[in-house]
Amino acid sequence: MSDQRIRVRFAPSPTGPLHIGGVRTALYNYLFAKKHKGDLILRIEDTDSHRFVSGAESYIIESFKWLGIQFDEGVGIGGPHGPYRQSERKEIYKKYVDYLLEKGRAYIAFDTPEELENKRSSIANFQYDASTRSQMRNSLTIPKEECDKLIGNGTPYVVRVKIEPGEEITVNDLIRGKVVINSSVLDDKVLYKSADSLPTYHLANIVDDHLMEITHVIRGEEWLPSAPLHVLLYRYLDWENTMPSFAHLPLLLKPEGNGKLSKRDGDRLGFPVFPLEWTDPKSGETSSGYRESGYFPEAVLNFLALLGWNPGNNQEILTMNELIELFSFEHCSKSGAKFDFEKGKWFNHQYLQKKTNEEITDLFIPILKEKNISAEKEYVTKVVALMKERVSFVKDLWEQVSFFFIAPTTYDEKAIKKRWKAESGKQLLELTEFLAGLNDFSASATEEPIKKWIDKKGYSLGGVMNTFRLALVGELKGPHIFEIMEMLGKDETIERTEKAVKILTSC
């Protein structure tokens, strides 16, 4: 690594919600920047005005706030290289468009959409390049006077890069190694459109990366085909000595089958593909988010970090500081990573267990309030301590612990058929009489006396305890029965048992 300060950027387009694959790209940029004590810039690439979606930019910013990925410069932060929205940098780009035209490295094209479509229909695999540009309506084929007149009359035009054929273009990628492409396979990409006075992605990102002093471009594999053009543009703009290093990350793949992870996969299999819930402003359709689904942001980041990268050991649970310390491109995979959403749940379970009972209690109490449940915090904390290992999400606690707060009103039919016998009611009533005489109702104090009582009576231990659990819980679930008794207390335990006997013996 040279002495130059490391500067990377994440540059999403505000065309919809931030995909989880984009989050991973931002995370890798963040890890690389922090490891080398560099800067991470947030740039909004909004040059495609036709695809702009209202609310997408604020969604992107809110997503990173929730995730805890902090930017050093950019939209919403500021910095010395602003503005950081490409739509606010029109005058900057025009200067470099004019430079390319002056140098003969770009040209103006007036072809209409209809004319281009006719060419595509008449020429198989048509692309606008050195072999076809002479057949088109552009500044290379029409006199300068006519070209100037068309521009003066307001005729829409685009500026295309002029790529010479037969040239070997080398892209040195930090993950994929040396990639060599012949310029003959590239087309003369549009760099600028007069219709909205905005550049396309290809020119804008090169200019911005240069002016913002970006040293490393870390982006998804899908941008790899554009890398040779970007290398050429650095050369055409005479910026070869400031060209950043490239690192193209592997794709996130579908959990099942082949291809890139999509929203449809999440809809079909029931997992989020966006960090936050998103409501489409046009259709009104709402898509789930990791935040609203109950994931912890640190669990999401840990999960994503290991999709396409490994720390060089078998460690899976890694703090942010550990991720920063261990991150390197040498351990990034060249092949795509299957998106194992069940593994994502596992990570959330691990992070839930790492949290203190008090932390989980603070997250669970609002859920209790929604259920109109009022309980002492100390009691809730004890319930959480007993039951948190059984869930992966705080929101799932209620289903597991509701019987600690509300007495059952119904009883599991399968459990009744399997466990409730003719003598069960009589045995449980006798048990309540015995319980009434106990002074210490803690789990440690009740277990041995109750087991001895059952043995003395000649009853089946399993028969009594299973029907006792059914009476207290309504199902055959929950922690150690004696812990349930202690939590409920003597009076509630006896009341629930007597109520169950009354209901179940009358069935």
Image (cartoon, rainbow, N blue to C red):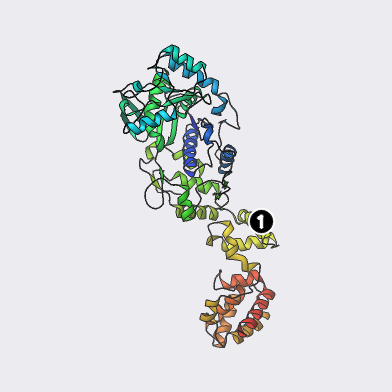
Would residue 183 appear left or right of 465 to someone viewing this image? left
Q: How many marks?
A: 1
User: Which is more toward the observer, 395 or 5?
Assistant: 395
Q: Amino acid at mark 1?
A: Pro
Residue 24 location in percent, x, y?
47, 41
With respect to residue 43, does 62 lie above or below? below
Give percent across and percent down for residue 448.
57, 77
Residue lying at the far top of the rendered structure: 145
Res 317 visible? no
What residue is drawn where x is 66% and y is 69%? Answer: 406
Q: State left or right for residue 423 relative to residue 267.
A: right
Q: Quadrant of the N terminus?
A: top left
Give x and y (percent) for residue 482.
59, 73
Looking at the rendered structure, the secondary structure element under dot 1 is helix
- The relative height of residue 394 versus residue 280 in the rendered view (above or below) is below
Res. 181 image quadrant: top left
Locate residue 203 relative to residue 404 in the image: left or right. left
Residue toward you, 312 or 192: 192
Asked whether residue 168 appears in the rendered view, the answer is yes
Q: Nearer the viewer, residue 382 or 232?
A: 232
Relative to 294, is 22 above or below?
Answer: above
Q: Which residue is mark 1?
A: 366
